[in-house]
Image (cartoon, rainbow, N blue to C red):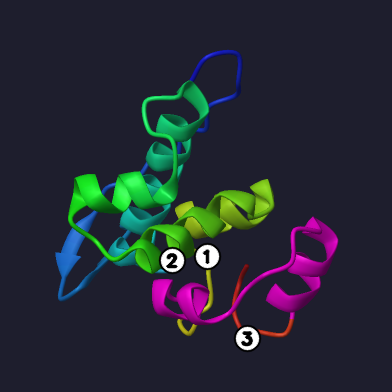
């Protein structure tokens, strides 16, 4: 990551259905949500460097509906600590990619944290 900070989370993942868990069994990683985050930040990078002009051009290249791309791109406005919590598997079970696609979060990180606080779970 050019000029930014990276995060390294040491863990061993084991496959269990559609989710993966760490060795300590306390945190569950939602693989679908993690893949959605990764795609969103990759697509945002393509937009930032000018490789793609719009979310619609990404959708055409990926053979996706433009709304899917735009919904995922909204993940890039999440507060860094919320992203870290998701990456560490500390998100509440009900906080899925589908939840993010159906619920728009405000840009304000403090308001996002307040919304996340209404869920039961670690985050």
Q: Whole-Å distance between the Cαs marked 3 and 2?
A: 14 Å
- Which residue lies under the disc numbered 3? 120
x then y, percent, for residue 49:
47, 22
Q: Position of residue 55 (x, y in %)?
A: 42, 49
Using the rendered view, name the quadrant where residue 74 is placed: bottom right
Give the SS element for disc 1.
Answer: loop
Question: Mark 2 = which residue?
Answer: 27
Identify the main secondary structure in magenta: helix
Task: Determine contact: label 1, label 2, CB under 8 Å.
Answer: yes
Instruction: Out of 39 and 81, give the one closest to the viewer.
Output: 39
Instruction: For the residues labelled 3 and 1, say whether their Cβ atoms are less than 8 Å apart.
Output: no
- What secondary structure is found at the residue carrying circle 2? loop
97 within the magenta span: yes
1 or 2: tag closer to the N-terminus:
2
Sooner in the amino-acid sequence: mark 3 or mark 2: 2
Residue positioned 43% across, 35% down in the render: 53
User: Against 95, is 68 above or below?
Assistant: above
Asked whether residue 73 is in view, the answer is yes
In the figure, is residue 14 to the left or right of 42?
Answer: left
Report the magenta residues as a range.
95-117
Circle number at residue 53: none
For this rendering, which residue is in front, 98 or 45?
45
Q: What label does residue 90 carry, if any?
A: 1
Task: Pick the residue in front: 73 or 29.
Answer: 73
Secondary structure beneath dot 3 equals loop
């Amino acid at each position: 990551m050019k000029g930014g900070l990276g995060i390294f989370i040491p863990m061993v993942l084991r496959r269990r259905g559609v989710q993966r868990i760490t060795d300590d069994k306390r945190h569950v990683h939602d693989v679908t949500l993690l893949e959605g985050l990764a795609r969103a930040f990759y697509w945002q990078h393509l937009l930032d460097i000018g490789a793609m002009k719009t979310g619609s051009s990404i959708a055409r290249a990926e053979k996706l509906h433009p709304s899917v791309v735009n919904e995922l791109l909204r993940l890039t406005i999440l507060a860094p600590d919320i992203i870290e919590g998701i990456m560490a598997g500390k998100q509440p079970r009900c906080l899925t990619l589908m939840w993010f696609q159906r619920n728009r979060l405000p840009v304000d990180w403090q308001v996002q944290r307040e919304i996340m606080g209404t869920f039961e779970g670690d985050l």
